[in-house]
Image (cartoon, helix red, strand yellow):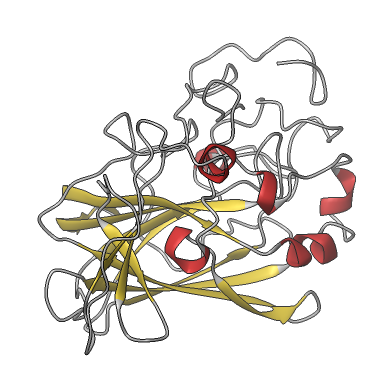
């Protein structure tokens, strides 16, 4: 389940002052009353977050990771019965090439692991630490659909998902994967055609996981989650690197929000096309693979 690249954290490389090859830099694209110059050379990404000043801040694309599956369903509720602390993810898509107008019709796709660190379609892959042999319900159709889905933005560019707070797996910090598509259409319950304009990941401050992981069913996964500062994909740039604004608590659930800007003419799938953070390959135990020897917690 390793998404490291040469065993070195992208964030640590940046902290050391290195401009590692393949790591997209940050820049500012003015969408307010003033423009600000580039924060780092070599930016190749095509998505952004909006800062409090009203500017569109270009953020680097990162790997889609080894757990992506095609043909996710278009739906708001992606839980498929999975237990966990409720989480609403609300994302706003904007066009950063002009006035940062809302991108009506953009299809936003997210996917993440369950409370024990398992992804649908990869339920025999080792999440690290000590976890039950497989997550709660991996039988039937939902073994390849839970915690995956699309929403299509309305005129305001907003999409909203109902899900659960993600669990953790070694060696990654808690995160949610995201892609923004344009130019396609809903077809037979999924989204077809068009292009991927942005591939990224959404992150949380550590304090939220520290509260959530004391609760059932999360507490059945025993081990030490990776801290945000130690993650190899999160670049340390706050909202510009996918850090969501989160409100709420474990009793009532959480709301995570972020604004993503895209260039509708750009394309970035995150699958070997310049996305940073290390790609990795699908682990043994994925769809069509033979399950790995040893249960969760063994070497992989």
Q: In the image, residue 169 lies at what x, y percent?
A: 70, 39
Q: Residue at x 26, y 33 (%)?
A: 273
For the point 71% across and 26% down, which residue is it?
126
Nearer the observer, 37 or 261: 37
Left or right of residue 248, residue 37 in this image: left
Q: Is residue 196 left or right of residue 136?
A: left
List x then y, in percent, for residue 299.
77, 15
Q: Along the horizontal axis of the image, is 201 left or right of 284?
A: left
Residue 91, how many percent across, how many down? 41, 72
- Residue at 81% across, 18% down: 298
Q: Residue furthest bottom?
A: 33
**Farthest residue toward the front?**
17
Residue 242 appears in the rendering: yes
Q: Is residue 279 above or below residue 77?
A: above
Quarter in which the N terminus is drawn: top right
Could you say which quadrant of the image residue 244 lies in? bottom right
User: In the figure, is residue 19 to the left or right of 207?
Assistant: left
Question: Which residue is more in the foreground, 270 or 249?
Answer: 270
- Residue 192 in view of the camera: no
In the foreground, 84 or 249 = 249
The image quadrant where one finds the C terminus is top right
Q: Position of residue 130 (x, y in %)?
A: 87, 32
Marker count (numbered): 0
Image point (48%, 24%), residue name: 280
């Amino acid at each position: 389940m390793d998404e490291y690249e040469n065993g070195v954290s992208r964030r640590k490389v940046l902290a050391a002052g290195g401009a590692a090859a393949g790591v997209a830099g940050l820049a500012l694209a003015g969408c307010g009353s003033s423009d600000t110059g580039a924060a780092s050379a070599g930016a190749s990404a095509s998505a952004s977050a909006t800062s409090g000043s009203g500017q569109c801040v270009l953020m680097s694309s990162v790997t889609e990771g080894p757990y992506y599956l095609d043909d996710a369903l278009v739906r708001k509720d992606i839980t498929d019965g999975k237990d966990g602390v409720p989480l609403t993810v609300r994302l706003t898509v904007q066009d950063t090439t002009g006035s940062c107008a809302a991108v009506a019709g953009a299809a936003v796709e997210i996917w993440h692991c369950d409370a024990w660190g398992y992804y649908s379609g990869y339920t025999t892959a080792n999440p690290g630490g000590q976890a039950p042999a497989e997550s709660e319900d991996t039988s039937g159709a939902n073994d390849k659909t839970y915690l995956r889905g699309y929403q299509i933005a309305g005129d305001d560019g907003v999409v909203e998902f109902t899900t659960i707070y993600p669990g953790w797996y070694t060696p990654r910090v808690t995160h949610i994967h995201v892609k923004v598509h344009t130019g396609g259409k809903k077809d037979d319950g999924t989204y077809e055609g068009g292009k991927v304009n942005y591939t990224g990941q959404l992150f949380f401050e550590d304090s939220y996981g520290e509260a959530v992981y004391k609760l059932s069913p999360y507490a059945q996964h025993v081990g030490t989650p990776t801290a945000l500062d130690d993650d190899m994909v999160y670049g340390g740039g706050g909202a510009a690197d996918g850090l969501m604004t989160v409100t709420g608590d474990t009793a009532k659930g959480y709301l995570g929000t972020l604004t993503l800007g895209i260039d509708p003419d750009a394309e970035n799938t995150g699958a070997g096309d310049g996305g940073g953070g290390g790609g990795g390959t699908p682990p043994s135990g994925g769809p069509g693979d033979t399950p790995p020897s040893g249960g969760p917690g063994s070497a992989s």
